[in-house]
Image (cartoon, rainbow, N blue to C red):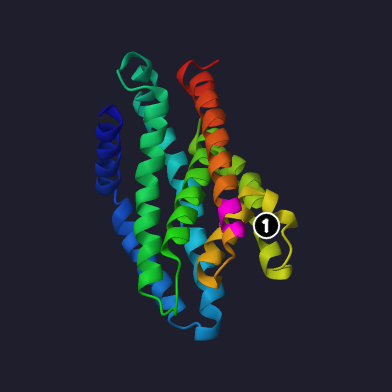
Amino acid sequence: MRIIHAVKADILFQFRQGFYLVYVVITGMYLLILSLIPDKLLDIVTPLVIFSDPSVLGLFFIGGIIMLEKIQGVLSVLVVTPLRSAEYLLAKIISLSMISFLSGFAIAALTQHEKINWLLLFLSVIFTSGLFTMCGIIISAGCSTVNGYLLKMIPYMLLFVLPCFSLLVFPGSWLFTIVPSVAALRLMMGAYTSIPLPGAVGLVLYLAGINFLCFRLTLNLFERKIIFQD
């Protein structure tokens, strides 16, 4: 029950801060851009657009949220509340994933495509959002200001995003799939290009494992660097 209340509180906070309004505008802009793309390229461009949505959302928004709650003293009293650190983090991940989910599925549903594997699209959006949100929390653990966070975020963004271009340059190669962001994008593109079942299952299991390990790392750093300020 605690985590349900925490998720509701985070969603309400994000709504009041205009996150949902911002993403209505952003989604509308994406749809306008995609309407100008030739139909034969949509199966490549659309998943790239949807992929960029949770990655940007997770990295940019979570940093601002963590910094704001540091300033407000919310995190300093978390240790004396019934809400556990794991529940606090899961609430953040789930609530931000909700925005990514709504935006990504709106883009997919309102863009012309012959066939979409909605299950793979859902899983890829959730895994991508979770991965980048946790990455943002890890980065924020060592920052005390928003400017410091933005500067520190750049190399992480490059580390995750640049390998994704391998799917455009070497579409048949699985070499870079070991990079979690590449695996997430490959799964998302597979929702549009009918990826073989063994490949899809392998990517889902790999990303689920990576998200789990990343969550354990995030939880450890969050408690050590932010809660107890070790």
- Give the residue number, with chain letter if any, for mark 1: 162
Answer left or right for 7 relative to 60: left
Place of residue 48 in the rendered image (x, y in percent of width and height, measured from the top left): 54, 66
Out of 156 and 96, give the one closest to the viewer: 96
Place of residue 45 in the rendered image (x, y in percent of width and height, measured from the top left): 54, 73
Residue drawn at 36 percent across, 71 percent down: 109
Q: What secondary structure do most residues of the magenta stretch adopt?
A: helix
Out of 5 and 145, give the one closest to the viewer: 5
Answer left or right for 77 relative to 49: left
Residue drawn at 52 percent across, 40 percent down: 136
Out of 73 and 190, give the one closest to the viewer: 190
Q: Is residue 25 magenta?
A: no
Q: Based on the displayed image, in which of its 4 quarters is residue 105 positioned?
A: bottom left
Answer left or right for 180 relative to 8: right
**What amino acid is at disc 1?**
Leu
Residue lying farthest to the front in this orientation: 198
Q: Quadrant of the N terminus?
A: top left
Count of numbered tags: 1
Q: Is residue 101 above or below residue 117?
A: above
Could you classify mark 1 by the number of other residues whose Cα lies within 10 Å: few (under 14), some (14-19), or many (20 or more)? few
Place of residue 149 in the rendered image (x, y in percent of width and height, measured from the top left): 54, 39
Give the magenta range: 198-203
Q: Secondary structure at mark 1?
A: helix
Q: Quadrant of the C terminus?
A: top right
Residue 141 visible in this rendered orientation of the protein: no
Answer left or right for 27 relative to 12: right
Residue 179 visible in this rendered orientation of the protein: yes
Out of 13 and 185, give the one closest to the viewer: 185
Place of residue 152 in the rendered image (x, y in percent of width and height, measured from the top left): 61, 40
Residue drawn at 34 percent across, 58 percent down: 102
Residue drawn at 47 percent across, 63 percent down: 50
